[in-house]
Amino acid sequence: MALDVLENDAKRRSLKPLRKLYPYVLRYRVLVLGAIFSLVLAAATTLTLPIALRRMIDHGFTSSDSTFISNYFGMMVVIAGVLALASACRYYFVITLGERVVADLRRDVFAHVTKLSPGFFDTVQSGEIVSRLTADTTQIKSTVGATASVALRNAILGLGALAMMVITSPKLSGLVIAAIPVIVLPLVAFGRSVRRKSRAAQDTLAEASAYASEQIGAVRTMQSFTNEALVVSRFSTAVNAAFEAARSSVLARSVLTFFAIFAIFSSVVAVLWFGSKDVLAGTISPGTLGQFLLYSVFAAGALGALSEVWGELSQAAGAAERLTELLAEEPAIAAAASPVAMPVPATGSVEFRDVVFAYPVRPGQAALDNLSFRVKPGETVAIVGPSGAGKSTVFSLLLRFYDPDGGKILIDGVDLRDADLGELRSRIAIVPQDVTIFAATARDNIGFGRPRATEAEIVQAARDAHADEFIGRLEKGYDTELGERGVTLSGGQRQRVAIARAILRDAPILLLDEATSALDAESETLVQTALEELMEGRTTIVIAHRLATVLKADRILVMEDGRIVEEGTHRSLVAKGGTYARLAALQFDHGSEALQRAAG
């Protein structure tokens, strides 16, 4: 299931998730080849140092030839220069590669998330997704940009040192090679534990981040109910849980590092002890022992570094696993393989045929039950009913956020499941009850309705929605930042921005979900006029409780328990004395006399 953090242990015992990064890395072969060449050159240069040391000990010191020693020291300076250049190139190539790979990965993950169906977000916290886009990709950047190169460098250096040890002294090399399984096998076992604990730490931190994101987004509600202490306490609990998980991971890595360093350097001491006996016996020269000792130190250091790197690679594998889980999510709303072309020009007809639907999170509870109705091109239909009747579900299905479990929905005679999703939604404009205002300028917020709209079209849409007058009073006019979720605007102002956005979209089908619910009496009058102009010549479906909107509708559909229980005009439905008359008496006016005046 989506983002299930309880993966089985078999998946957690390897670095296989890192293989998913190969396609991203291989896009930049020049950087990869440059990094590998630099790594090999640095390792090869390092491996020449013990040979120089042996020749100085065996030849330079014994003959007291100062010129010989000077030449060798000069040569070592040249080697140091080559090593420094190779290391600098390695740093440039691998860090650039890491930044590039993570930028691509973040882009692809975000692009994939934007295509997932709304049903996915019914069960997943947005903060969890943001954590994967930030913390997990940062962990991968560290791995691709540094850890992987360190691992590769030490692997090359370690293998090269082992090879040179065999060449230098097969006898002493045999002792070292015999000790390798004793060292490596426990490292692998510890590494598995580190990876499991690293994944747990990442998941716990993501949960804490998700909770913080949710509370920051609702800071006004939190402060209004004076729940600061409660929120801080819960976040502290989440942070402490994340800390404990991280500490467990760090402890495992510390034990791993202790064992690796102790075992490796103990073996070096043992080799030195055996080698010193061979020098005293005259079997090998002091320079040869020095050369072998340096190679063994290189090999030991490389293995020690690899043991530390293993923990970091395990963390990165956990991060890669979490990201690939996200990339593996398939949209519940599948695009048609061969979409049916929708008629041009659009007419704006809408039809529901025996539609049955239940939300995925509540599969046993039907939101719509054999719902059927038709809206003719240019007709205005109002949908009313008690809370939970299924009114908003109609809009969600029209926008194809979900597919019905049974029946068909058609726009311009085409089944939504057969139409191109982009073409379908381009024919619909919506003014929702809960308006979304982005942390951008007023111009950008209105222009979101049609990104390629001109400045003049944006301004005209604002004027038609009666938003131009308050935007003009803002500090920078249309260039004023409106703040996250439009916190700098009143509810009515946010609603008018949303209406301007819908006007700019200029779609043949208009969906109004309580479009005037947040407006005061004066603003409602202005916006109602703008809406009437916007509705003219368009198919309009209105979810409304406001009397003015309902009275203007050509037809009213009364929904209850996912079905249409009444249909007609305001006057005819009031005369029936059924569900609509009861709702009208409760919600539109508070007395029958006022209701009759409105109806008459």
Image: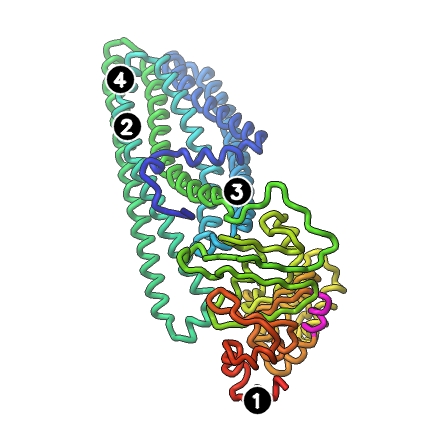
Q: Which residue is mark 3?
A: 105
Query: Which label sits in the foreground, 4 or 2?
Result: 2
Earlier-in-chain disc, 4 versus 1: 4
Q: Nearer the viewer, mark 4 or mark 1?
A: 1
Expressed as whole percent of the image width and height from the top left, the position of residue 208 reads: 38, 56
Say whether residue 591 is left or right of residue 259: right
Q: Which residue is located at x 41 percent, y 20 percent?
A: 160
Tag 2 or tag 4, which sits nearer the N-term? 4
The dot on residue 185 is 2
- Mark 3 and mark 4 lie on one chain; the one further toward the N terminus is 3
Camera-near label (3 vs 4) is 3
Judge whether residue 428 is colored magenta.
no
Q: CA distance from mark 3 to mark 4?
A: 45 Å
Of the image marks 1 and 2, the number of the one nearer the N terminus = 2
Q: Secondary structure at mark 4?
A: helix
Given the image, on which type of amino acid does mark 4 rest? Leu
Furthest residue to the bottom?
A: 593
Tell which of 345 and 182 is nearer to you.
345
Asked whether the beta carbons under mark 3 and mark 2 sit within 8 Å of each other, the answer is no
Q: Residues within 10 Å of mark 1 (few under 14, many from 20)?
A: few
Residue labelled with disc 1: 594
Q: Earlier in the sequence, mark 1 or mark 3?
A: 3
Amino acid type, callout 2 = Leu
